[in-house]
Image (cartoon, rainbow, N blue to C red):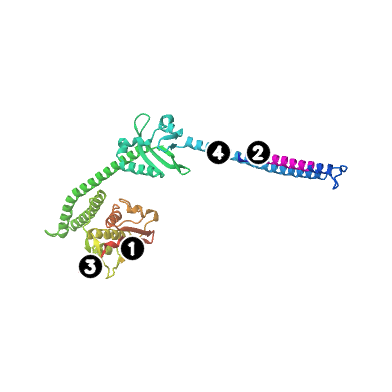
Amino acid sequence: MRIHLLHIAVLIAVFVSILTLYGTSVSSGLSNATNAAVQISSTGAITEPTPADNSALPLLSETLIWCGVTFILLQSALIVLLVFSHLRHRRLKEALRASEKRYQDIASISSDWFWELDAEHKLTHLSDRYEKVTGQTVASQRGTSYLQFESLNWDSDRADAWKDHRDTLKARKPFRNFEYAASGADGELCYRRISGTPIFVDDVFRGYRGTGSDITEERARQAQLLRTIYEADHANRAKSAFLANMSHELRTPLNAIIGFSEILTGQLFGKMQNDRYLEYAKDINDTGQHLLTVLNDLLDISRIEAGFLTLDENVIDPRRMLRSCARMLNEKISAANLTLNLDIPPDLPALLGDETRLRQVVINLLTNAVKFTPESGTIWVSANIADDGGFEITVKDTGVGIAAQDLERVMEPFQQAEQDLSRRYGGVGLGLSLARNLTELHDGTINLESEPGIGALARVYLPADRVRTYPT
């Protein structure tokens, strides 16, 4: 438009310039002709007129020629500008049509709808997708505001969220994923999620625009998931309670079996006439002791999962605890023809924890090491202070090892790594799991490193805030 006006202005200016130059040239020529036609002598006599001087005519022609050339050049330049302007406008129109088509395509296939609000937060635009998703016509929603749903029951229970949202709108800031309840096409409660950004034109607030989606089905799935989690947790607690009750009920008669078998093996009421009876009594006692250990582990696992296991924490001496654990397993280590090396620095600090549970962790790790280490193997137990001030207990063996893909699995309850080596001691796969749970109750961790055919290393780490000095 500006180029068209410029074109017209240039045409008028050139035309006026030509007329002005032409008038000036004609006037000059006429004046020269008049002066030449009448000449008065100094004596007052009138002389004969001389022919008019035609030297002005070439000047007029030359001026007109240059004006025409200038006009042609200006016209050419303006025509070029008009051509480029036309091409530019055509590209802009094509880009605008492509942008509109892109918006329409995205709006038609998107699961969300697009909306715009005016400065009073009333709907001025909704994409057609809104009607397909919600079943409500676009025309019926224009001029309404989603802020009217704040009084619904579900929204009124989220007063803090609505207050924060209104503060955001008042500050004219963008917002994301604001959820609210609304009345659907059938009058039932539905749930929506919107995100918006403010609109400013020449620094004047004009409203908001953004996207919206229906999350009614999503919230239904969330509710179903929560119910499933609750039912699973309830079933898990029921399982834990069952295991705890059964373990308790089984321990009572088992203690009697172990007690009477010890009486028989000790021959407290006289020597047995047949040595086979004595061997049978020892087998009964060993089996009872093993079963009691399994039941105790089951009871501890169930109590931990149910959240009923608490720690009896005191300042303990880890040096004495580790030596005590080694003595408890000395008979099994000797029977398996293994070597146990203890590396316990004399200046180890004290620990804050439940000595019974920490002793249980070390014994379970040592039992696994004895179980999976072939004859003539070696087991190391060491303790030291970590670089960050934490306390570390390490149990290492030269056993059959564990494959890398089984390292995490063996830490779960009732899981065992499949090995060709026959186990010298039975088990149900609770030792490592129980050791990890008891360590985590002390805010610690267990890391397991192993390589098949070389051995395994279990590292128990307790945080620095559990390291103490010995009481005086």
Tell me, yes or no, whether the two marked residues, 2 and 1, touch with CB atoms within 8 Å: no
Tell me, for residue 96, which label it has, or none: 4
Query: Crowding at label 3, few (<14), some or many (≥20) Cα neighbours within 10 Å?
Result: few
- Magenta residues? 10-30
Q: Which numbered mark, 1 or 4, is in the foreground of this view?
A: 4
In percent of width and height, residue 430 lies at: 29, 53
- Residue on which the image places disc 1: 396
Task: Say the numbered circle drawn on residue 8.
Answer: 2
**Residue beneath the point at 34% across and 29% down:** 187
Regarding residue 135, the answer to whether it shows in the image is no
Q: Earlier in the sequence, mark 3 or mark 2?
A: 2
Check disc 1 and give the amino acid type. Lys
Query: Which secondary structure lies at badge 1?
Result: strand
Secondary element at image label 4: helix
Quarter of the rendering containing residue 27: top right
Query: Tag on residue 470?
Result: 3
